[in-house]
Amino acid sequence: MKKNRVVLVFLVLLALGNACLYFLNREKGLAVLLTGKNYLLEMLSILPPILILVGLFEVWVPRPVIERAMGQSSGLKGILVSCFLGTAAMGPLYVAFPIGLSLFEKGASLFNVCIFLCVWASIKIPMILFEIKFLGADFALLRLALTIPSILTISALLNSILKRSFNHEKI
Amino acid sequence: MFSLIVWIFAAGLLFLSFLKNKYKTAKSLKVSWKFFSSMALLVLLTIWAIGFLVTFLPSAFISKTIGRNAGIEGVILAAIFGSIVLIQAFIAFPLAGSFLRQGASITAIAAFVTTLVMVGVLTAPLEVKFFGKKFTLWRNSLSFIFAIVIALLMGVILR
């Protein structure tokens, strides 16, 4: 809530700034508002359904389900399932750290853990929808298509670099 | 058009969820609302700030720093910025979109968005706690390098 108050202060400052600007330079003051209005409309046209999706995913695919899916088989199949489920879950990268660690403790390879972390961080269905809206379908889908092989390569490299210095007892 | 598809998709899923379990559906809407109220002001702030940005930040400046003529330095600058800041996609994508319209290059924007999600300098201490220094260092460095590779490829393909 403290964060909200800070944001509110900034909002008031922007409003004051905008009002001063309007009196000093009508045209520019209106231009700021117009641009803001256009972005607001764009945002409102996509935000509600995405929020609904976030809520639905959270309830139907809660984090414990993801962890359980991995627990049954921490091999490739478990990873694929958890990655797939992970694309539905919201939450930044640091939310995935504990899940990734439990995966590792259950015997998953570094390769698989790294894939899981990177997929969790970068591939999210609600986020992709948002990216298509604001950056275009070409941009979002091409980035997705390039991200997947990159994640595989990153994980393979990481695995071969750290293989010798990493073992399951160490963590 | 795209928004319409997303609306229909979300409405369809919501309807299915409602048929299957009313209680869970109500709970999901509560989650949505909580998520919304936690970010509504911030989104409004971002949108307003974009208004100022677009009006006052000369596009010449943007295209000079992260535009097509900024070269690899602009891309790396955008990638470093994306690695450090910790912002939600809901705020980052509209912002990135406005930069793109103001003359930023596709390469720089792709680098920014990709490092934003894959590289976390601020979350690195937490990652170290879970996976150790070596893992964190390598995962983030490799992700950074690949983000730039992805960005450069996108710049070539989407020219």
Image (cartoon, coloured by chain):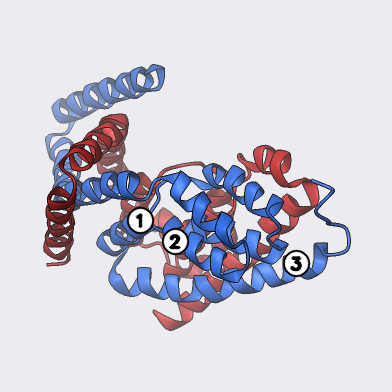
Chain colours: A blue, B red
Image position of B155 (left or right of B147): left
Q: Nearer the viewer, residue B60 or A53?
A: A53
Dots 3 and 1: beta carbons under 8 Å?
no
Q: Nearer the viewer, residue B2 or B20?
A: B20
Image coords of residue A157 (percent x, y): 73, 70
Looking at the image, residue A69 lies above or below residue A25: below
As drawn, which residue projects farthest toward the bottom? Answer: B157
Name the residue: 14% across, 48% down. Answer: B18
Q: Earlier in the sequence, mark 3 or mark 1?
A: 1
Q: Nearer the viewer, residue A166 or B66?
A: A166
Kind of residue sitting beneath label 3: Asn
Dots 1 and 2: beta carbons under 8 Å?
yes
Residue behind mark 3: A159
User: Is residue A151 visible in the rendered structure shown here?
Assistant: yes
Image position of B61 (left or right of B70): left
Q: Earlier in the sequence, mark 3 or mark 2?
A: 2
Kind of residue sitting beneath label 2: Ile
Label 1: chain letter: A
Label 3: chain letter: A
Looking at the image, residue A149 lies above or below residue A155: below
Q: Which mark is residue A123?
A: 2
